[in-house]
Image (cartoon, helix red, strand yellow):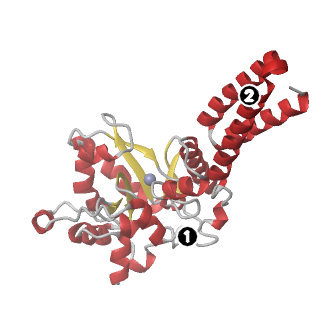
């Protein structure tokens, strides 16, 4: 087989590999074998080998076209509306039952341990989600929590008290993440998109799926310094199971007392556009947090009532 043909086949392999690494590896091995065998037996089995190579090239071409159908979509072309997010999340609506709502209400009525932090007025509560990106020029008033962890000044005392009070009850909470700037949020988001693409998703599919699990850069509450990812020494992973641990249950039941809410609750995925995240809390002030917890609503629903 001539060098130019060999080069062309290798180029096709490379192109295919970019689209699907696993299939590309298989295709590379296969094409390599064809080339080797063709060099050895080309003088008397040429017709058969050319047929095999042609069929292989055709298969690769078809696969490439199939993989490339929507992988040329760039982020700016992919507006993720609430509807598309809902499609990706599905209709997982594990709505709280009346008895559960009553139980929550009773607990709140009997609770006298709410903290008295200087509260935000409702008009101060900034809504940040896919359809409400952070306003241009917004600058959080950052303070250091410890080491390289930072948050907005208004959340410092509440988050510190929450961690300390939990520890008094043998719940060892750990702040996994607090303030993140745009670049850091973009790194996290892009990395996740790439991971999904390695699993075989197209760019558009990977982007859409990532957007239900991570906030799009420029619309993350971490970027305003009012959100925290909380795990525990016994359960360091940020996953759904955290909500079933003692630490997750404590956080769910008590964070409102400090002015925090579980921002992406179970059963509200279609409202928030984000999957259930029992580890992600958002500071909104005690009054708002209490009502949101009591009514089992989201920040979106709370602000809509105002
Ligand atoms: Zn988070």
x, y percent for residue 132: 51, 73
Q: Is residue 59 above or below residue 283?
A: above
- For disc 2, the marked residue is 48
* Residue 127 seen anywhere in this rendered image of the structure: no
x, y percent for residue 87: 43, 65
Q: Is residue 36 above or below residue 94?
A: above
x, y percent for residue 116: 28, 65
Disc 2 secondary structure class:
helix
Q: Is residue 274 above or below residue 194?
A: below
Residue that appears at 9% across and 65% down: 99
Using the image as rendered, state which of residue 24 and residue 305 is in the foreground. 24
* Residue 22 seen anywhere in this rendered image of the structure: yes
Point out the tag, 1 or 2, that comes first from the N-terminus. 2
Q: Count the marks: how many?
A: 2
- In which quarter of the view is residue 181 placed? bottom right
Residue that appears at 73% across and 25% down: 34
x, y percent for residue 193: 57, 49
- For disc 1, the marked residue is 133
Q: Which mark is residue 283?
A: none
Q: Quadrant of the N terminus?
A: top right
Left or right for 51, reference 117: right
Residue that appears at 33% across and 35% down: 233
Using the image as rendered, state which of residue 169 and residue 219 is in the foreground. 219
Using the image as rendered, state which of residue 33 and residue 75 is in the foreground. 33
For the residue carrying disc 1, how many other residues have a C-alpha within 10 Å: few (<14), some (14-19), or many (20+)?
A: some
Q: Nearer the viewer, mark 1 or mark 2?
A: 2
Left or right for 268, reference 175: left
Residue that appears at 41% across and 49% down: 229
- In which quarter of the view is residue 295 placed? bottom left
**How far separated are the C-alphas under marks 1 and 2?**
60 Å
Using the image as rendered, state which of residue 30 and residue 158 is in the foreground. 30
Disc 1 secondary structure class:
loop
């Amino acid at each position: 087989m001539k060098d130019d043909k060999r080069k062309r086949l290798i180029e096709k392999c490379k192109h295919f590999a970019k689209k699907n690494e696993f299939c590309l590896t298989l295709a590379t091995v296969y094409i390599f074998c064809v080339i080797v065998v063709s060099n050895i037996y080309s003088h008397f089995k040429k017709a058969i080998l050319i047929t095999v190579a042609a069929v292989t090239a055709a298969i690769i071409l078809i696969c490439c076209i199939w993989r490339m159908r929507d992988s040329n979509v760039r982020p700016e072309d992919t507006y993720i509306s609430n509807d598309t997010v809902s499609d990706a999340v599905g209709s997982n609506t594990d709505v709280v039952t009346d008895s559960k709502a009553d139980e929550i209400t009773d607990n709140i009525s009997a609770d006298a341990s709410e903290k008295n932090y200087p509260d935000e007025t409702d008009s101060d509560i900034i809504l940040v989600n896919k359809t409400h990106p952070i306003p241009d020029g917004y600058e959080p008033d950052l303070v250091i929590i410890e080491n390289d962890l930072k948050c907005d000044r208004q959340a410092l005392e509440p988050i510190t008290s929450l961690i300390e009070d939990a520890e008094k009850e043998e719940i060892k909470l750990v702040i996994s993440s607090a303030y993140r700037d745009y670049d850091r949020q973009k790194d996290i988001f892009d990395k996740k998109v790439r991971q999904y693409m390695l699993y075989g998703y197209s760019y558009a599919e990977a982007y859409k799926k990532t957007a239900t699990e991570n906030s799009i850069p420029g619309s993350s509450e971490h970027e305003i310094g009012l959100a925290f990812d909380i795990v525990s020494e016994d359960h360091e992973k940020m996953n759904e199971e955290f909500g079933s641990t003692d630490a997750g249950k404590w956080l769910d039941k008590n964070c409102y007392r400090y002015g925090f809410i579980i921002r992406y609750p179970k059963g509200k995925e279609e409202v928030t556009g984000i999957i259930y995240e029992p580890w992600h809390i958002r500071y909104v002030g005690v009054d708002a947090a209490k009502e949101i917890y009591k009514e089992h609503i989201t920040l979106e629903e709370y602000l809509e009532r105002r």
